[in-house]
Image (tube, rainbow, N blue to C red):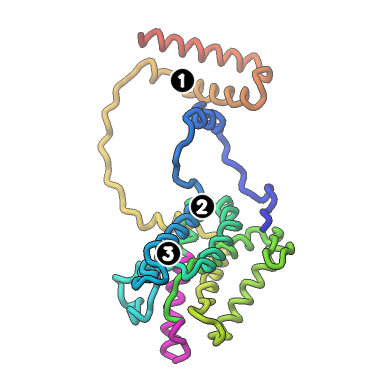
Amino acid sequence: MNAPPASWRQPRKSNAGVGFSDRDYNRDEYDRSNGFQLRLPQSATTALILINVVLWATDSLLFPDDSPRAHRLMDFLQLDWETWRHPLSHPFQWWQFFTCGFAHGSFMHLFSNMLELFFLGKFVEQAYGTKEFTRFYLSALVVGSIGWAVLLHIGLALGFVADDQRVLLGASGAISGVVMLFVLNFPQAKLMLLFPPIPIKAWVIGVFLIGMNVFGVFEGRDPNQQGPQVAYSVHLFGIAFAAIYFLRGWNLGAFFSWFRMPRLPQRPAFRIHNPDKDDEPTDLRAEVDRILEKIHLSGESSLTKKERRTLEEASREFQRRNRGGN
């Protein structure tokens, strides 16, 4: 798939007001000087893909198909109605509404989901921020799982649910939500399909995604398909959640903040008075930060006489403080 143009991405946050050592260009040089460092993924999209791949690979290596305990890890993570009969009424099993989104039935099942997340998730993450994107993804996952359980309960009561439709696993509910959120934010973006390899606008993908899943729900079980059936209802719940989230302009960070425990009042800490440091004008430090960034962007020749005097004043103040500390 092709990426949307750079003009559609969120602008980078300004570095104004931060110290010289905190700026991107200075921090990058410091990091390079320390050589290779093993770090956790900074992108939620990358982290989610990594978690899903690691879990599937662990299950395949420790519990292969020819083992008596085949796919024991995936069985543990999936939402299994047949085992618990009615998971909605078993609170001690509610964690499966979350973990089933990290279980996959086959390599192709995993590959197709992670491929969509890889191509589109990073743009949605850039638009909403890493934390809000993570909250949206996990919320869409849980909403889809609970919606599936409710519909399954209704279907069992009416007698039109097949035996192999009583197990839920896969991230497709959350992935469908991410795809729809991309479509709503970038409807005119051109995406390159894999099969066939032709460009197509995002809004067309959105219409096709909705239509395909609505048709799948009403068509029912495919007698020619072997193994577990596609959970079209989970896709639709993810799509609906994304549409409501976008149209209502929700902020899940503000919503989840309601459930935080109130902080106890803290006693003020003792503070040691340092005349040299405390008497240093805050405005001078801020002005020096601004001038240093201007030098980095435009060169020293771009400074005015006033800005040069400010740097000289700051240099004298720094030398005075150093002499006083010796």
Q: Which residue is mark 3?
A: 60
Question: Which callout, 2 or 1, points at the residue further toward the start of the chain?
Answer: 2
Q: Which residue is mark 1?
A: 281
- Which part of the image, by quadrant, shows the N terminus? bottom right
Tell me the mark number nearer the camera, choosing from 1 and 3. Answer: 3
Region rendered in magenta? 140-164
Q: Is residue 106 visible?
A: yes
Count of picture labels: 3
Write the residue at 57% across / 60% down: 115
Question: Residue 161 in magenta?
Answer: yes
Name the residue furthest front: 66
Depth check, front residue: 278 or 171: 171
Q: Is 90 rendered above or below residue 156?
A: above
Mark 2 and mark 1: span between their CA atoms? 43 Å
Q: Is residue 17 visible?
A: no
Give x and y (percent) for residue 320.
43, 9
